[in-house]
Image (tube, grey):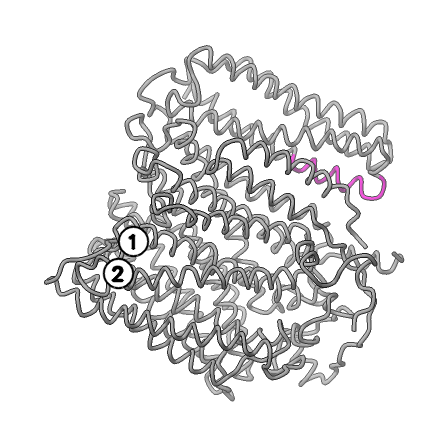
Amino acid sequence: MSDATHAEHHHTSLDVDNRKLGMWLLIASECMLFGSLIVTYMIYRGQSVTGPQPAEVLDIPVTTVSTFVLLMSSFSIVLALAGIQRGDIAAFRRWILITALGGLTFLGFQAFEFTEFVHKGLGLTTNVFGGSFFMLTGTHGTHVAVGVIWLLSLYFSSLRGRLVEDGPLKVDTMALYWHFVDVIWIVIFTVVYLFVYV
Amino acid sequence: MTEAALSPGYAKSGLWSWLTTVDHKRIGILYGVTALLFAVVAGIEAMLIRTQLIVPDNDFLGADTFNALFTMHGTTMIFMFVMPINAAFFNFIVPLQIGARDVAFPRLNALSYWIFLFGGLLFHSAFLHGVVAWPRVGWFGYANLTSSQFTPGVATDYWIISLQLLGLASLIASINFIATILNMRAPGMTPMRMPLFTWTTLITNFLLLLALPVITVALFQVLFDRHFGTHFFDPNAGGSVILWQHLFWVFGHPEVYILILPPMGMVSDVIPTFSRKPLFGYPAMVYASSAIAFLGFGVWAHHMFTVGLGPMANAIFSAVTMLIAIPTGVKIFNWISTAWGGSLRMTTAMLFAMGFIAEFTIGGLSGIMHASPPIDYQQQDSYFVVAHFHYVLVGGAVFGIMAGIYYWFPKITGRLLNETLGKTQFWLMVVGVNLTFFPQHFLGVDGMPRRIYTYPAGFNFETWNFWSTMGAYITAAAMLVFVYNVLTSLRSGAVAGPDPWDARTLEWAIASPPPEYNFATLPQVQARDDFWYRKHEAKTFQPEPEHAHVELPNPTFWPFMVAVGITLMGAGFIYGYWLSPLGLLVLFPSIWGWSFAKFEG
């Protein structure tokens, strides 16, 4: 493909790559998805006719730790992006792995939390708190898991030398997604965990 | 005429070329043909429904069959006919109107179509089983009728899973079309130069993008209730059946604008062409369409006036609903003003556009009536509401789509539809549709409820039900004329040439049907209605060169396989859970293959 056709092919009206624009649009849609789940959770607050209730099972200090780790992974992916943008592939690989590790840590905490809840008698079907809690946090956890797979595939792509031409763009798009998954967790952490005190 | 547009080794015809195509025009044709086939099925269902109601105490269909038929009719007409036929025009026409060579994400485009097709087929596979397996909860699926207590078996699962798949298809398509319209415009195609159909496509896809996730969540909740024992819609456990209504209508009301805005865009392109005038009040049309979409998210509870949300909530939702009459009125007056004083050519497309204005206005006026809660209390769940939304969706959406089909058929196929048959079809439809639905206003006011499979004699329902059914048969005759017209015109219609209507927008500047690469040289847009401007005002129009070499994306089979995987995962909830992991086994390698296949030529 000659340079001329290549330039024409990648010209866009808004000077932003289609993939990145598509990610912004996906995020808009995801806001409505999580919004609906959060509204459901809020409507069912205090509506369960049997226990356990949120205050009996939620372990806020533990979840604060995993929240901190997840938020820090937003920082590390920025460093990974900065690395690939200045061509420092070693820094990129280091920080992308640390980001994936942050995501995995969060998922580990979530698995531990879910197991604890089941031991304390809160399952998916126990009451409307259980149903709306597990569906909301489970949907978020699924997003983190997809993100971890994506991060690792970027890492392995770079090992195979595939992230040369549009690597910064691919990492930038992924970082957008990752930041969204973190931001939405701030809302969930507030609404589900901190609101226990309200 | 095209030379080596695709990399060598890829077939250009035959079944395999259709299964692997990423060409927006071919995907548009697939969408259109599939949607019309589903419309035939849903149309037959409508005929059966009307036949059952032709006389009192009829036993032509049983109650269960009747419930299934109105559920299948509504769901199919909305999700498998009007939405995908609109998507057919988004696909075929919009990239041409903005001067693009393809959509932003050609492979996602193919994925959307295959998920839509498989979702529709999965839904209709219920017909392979007895009536007990046919969905019969209405297109709105109110909780807790959808619980396993009240609809045991798989019937409701067909409805849930199919809607989930169809929603996913539309969601993917919405990202694709917004990105295409925002980002793939030809140089000079500023937003306020875009044809109005492109504008309503953009707005509709924003509605899809933001409304579909809400129904996705609601459908997951009811799915979890049925399969995993959660209590989202179980009042005994503190669940709320009203929550379903809220979530459904937060999606469902934008959905009606998703259905009607594209046909509004179609007639906004048809009327200027056949009036030989620019669209009157173009910026007002753009703002009115946007305002309708914006307000459309704030009126969902007008479907719930009788639920008992309280006078304050009812008053607010009533006021916002009535506000929508303002931008809608702006559009109606602008269409009339466009035609006013123009040199009119009453082609079939123009007739349908004019019919659209008249019929849609009738539906709009009855809509304003039940925007008022006290009046709605009288009309809720009566045939008056059936009359209202059929005026909007048949008199409105279907007339607009027919205008679009008669207008763009020559661009898509290279041949004109027969005008005599078209006008016959139009007048049959005018008589049939009004005879079917206008008497339903009277039936509703006289107290006939919706969704009943029969009615006793002596309530004054006999006469108008009889005429309503006669109207339905006349509409069916109109549709037979349409099918005959399409089939004969495909073979022997007059050859259209690039610009049979002396039209205004860019799609008419290229050959009919367009070459694979659309534009040999990308247009440099200088004006609104650029093609008209270059033809008749600047007189700078040059026909496209016969030969061009343009790099196009390679065909790929992976979108088809990804759609198969996703469909199998869903089908597991109907045909046995073992199918879901099998779907994952298909899905993962397909995504892998998709990610690493060489795509760009």
Q: Amino acid at mark 2?
A: Gln
Which residue is painted at 31% across and 51% down in the image? B65
Camera-side residue of B155 and B223: B155
Let me know if residue B312 appears in the view: yes
Residue type highlighted by circle 1: Phe
Read off the chain for label 1.
B
For mark 1, does the 10 Å Cα neighbourhood hold few (<14), some (14 to 19), or many (20 or more) residues? many
Mark 2 packing: few (<14 Cα in 10 Å), some, or many (20+)?
many
Q: Are marks 1 and 2 in contact (CB under 8 Å)?
A: yes
Q: Which structural element holds mark 1?
A: helix
| Magenta stretch holds residue B447 | no
Is B303 situated left or right of A187 in this image? left
Q: Label 2 lies in what chain?
A: B
Seen in the picture, residue A21 relative to B472 is either above or below; the reply is: above
Q: Quadrant of the C terminus of chain B?
A: bottom right
Which residue occupies 48% across, 67% down? Answer: B264
Which numbered circle lies on residue B66?
1
In the image, A32 versus B355, the foreground residue is B355
Residue A124's mark? none
